[in-house]
């Protein structure tokens, strides 16, 4: 699972594809990179195509990590964008209100964050995933 | 004239304020998963995971602290991808362990704050949200309510992204 990174656009295309299957592979990598979506680790086929394509583009190099993404309001749906904009405006208002404000501002935000975090309580921590064999050295990798 | 001057002054104060705050609320994320290629890399990941499991099971705060610090101090060998996930888990554990008084909270902010700074890319994983909430708690206890508020808001935004990722 480790080596299934999406090839960044800057790296793709250093060599021209040599045949039709190469072209479709590269097109797929372009598509994945364009959509900036993570490759599902369970999707071995896509991971293999990406790894194979990368090996052809730059033999001997390690496949790169997945591309970084910067959160942008433009990428969110209108509802979420509006919600984030309201949250940001609220933050600006809170952080720039007078210094004599009651200390409950950050407490209220903390309470909201902890409530939201409760929805992720069932998700194992990284070390738990390693020890359960879901991530890290016991799966994929090789070497 | 006086009215125009008032508007200009208000605008001049408002714009820089908004700009600096949007920087404090910035959230860059990266999709990364934990993996290890090579014996040394596998040993590193396995050892960190075992240390963290022992720390989580320990009732002794000093033992938890020592184990979590060991994870943070251990050099990351080549071949490990996503080591930041384990390091953030260790940071969150330290934050929780230290956050019992104001002095401990200040230590936690000093240690964990730079790891979660707005200029850094955070793994798109619940552990980043947990660490941000923990940083917010420590900052709140240490008296830095601005850092607390921005940490909580960044945590909420990151969790929104995780929920969006989970949606088909």
Image (cartoon, rainbow, N blue to C red):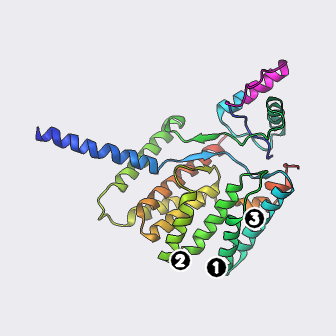
Q: Which badge, 1 or 3, comes first in the chain's sequence?
A: 3
Q: Please tell me whether residue A33 belongs to the stretch shown in magenta.
A: no
Write the residue at 50% across / 34% down. A74
Write the residue at 64% across / 44% down. B165
In the image, residue A67 lies at what x, y percent?
66, 39
Write the residue at 83% across / 61% down. B43
Residue underneath mark 2: B100
Local crowd size for mark 3, using a 10 Å CA cut-off: few (<14), some (14–19), many (≥20): many
Quadrant in the picture for residue B90: bottom right
Local crowd size for mark 2, using a 10 Å CA cut-off: few (<14), some (14–19), many (≥20): few
Chain letter belonging to callout 2: B
Chain letter belonging to callout 3: B
Distance between mark 2 and mark 3 Cα atoms:
25 Å
Residue B35 seen from this side? yes
Q: Which badge, 2 or 1, comes first in the chain's sequence?
A: 1
Residue underneath mark 1: B61
Identify the magenta region. A10-29
Mark 1 vs mark 3: tell me if same chain.
yes
Mark 2 vs mark 1: tell me if same chain.
yes
Distance between mark 1 and mark 3 Cα atoms:
18 Å
Quadrant of the snapshot with the C terminus of chain B: top right
């Amino acid at each position: 699972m480790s080596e299934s990174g999406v090839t960044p656009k800057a790296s793709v295309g250093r060599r021209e594809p040599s045949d039709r299957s190469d072209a479709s592979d590269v097109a797929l990598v372009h598509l994945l990179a364009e959509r900036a979506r993570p490759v599902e680790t369970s999707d071995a086929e896509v991971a293999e195509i990406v790894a194979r394509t990368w090996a052809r583009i730059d033999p001997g190099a390690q496949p790169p990590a997945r591309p970084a993404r910067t959160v942008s309001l433009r990428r969110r749906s209108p509802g979420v964008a509006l919600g984030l904009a309201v949250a940001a405006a609220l933050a600006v208002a809170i952080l720039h209100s007078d210094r004599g404000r009651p200390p409950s501002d950050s407490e209220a935000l903390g309470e909201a964050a902890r409530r939201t975090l409760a929805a992720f309580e069932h998700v194992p921590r990284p070390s738990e995933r390693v020890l359960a064999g879901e991530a890290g050295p016991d799966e994929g990798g090789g070497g | 004239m006086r009215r125009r001057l008032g508007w200009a002054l208000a605008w001049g104060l408002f714009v820089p304020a908004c700009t600096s705050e949007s920087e404090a609320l910035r959230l860059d994320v990266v999709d990364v998963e934990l993996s290890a290629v090579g014996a040394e890399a596998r040993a590193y990941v396995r050892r960190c995971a075992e240390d963290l499991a022992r720390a989580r099971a320990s009732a002794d705060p000093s033992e938890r602290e020592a184990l979590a610090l060991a994870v943070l101090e251990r050099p990351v060998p080549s071949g490990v991808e996503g080591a930041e996930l384990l390091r953030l888990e260790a940071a969150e554990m330290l934050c929780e362990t230290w956050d019992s008084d104001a002095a401990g909270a200040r230590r936690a902010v000093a240690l964990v704050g730079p790891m979660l700074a707005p200029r850094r890319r955070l793994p798109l994983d619940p552990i980043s949200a947990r660490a941000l909430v923990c940083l917010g708690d420590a900052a709140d206890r240490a008296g830095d309510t601005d850092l607390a508020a921005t940490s909580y808001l960044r945590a909420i935004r990151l969790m929104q992204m995780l929920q969006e990722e989970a949606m088909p």
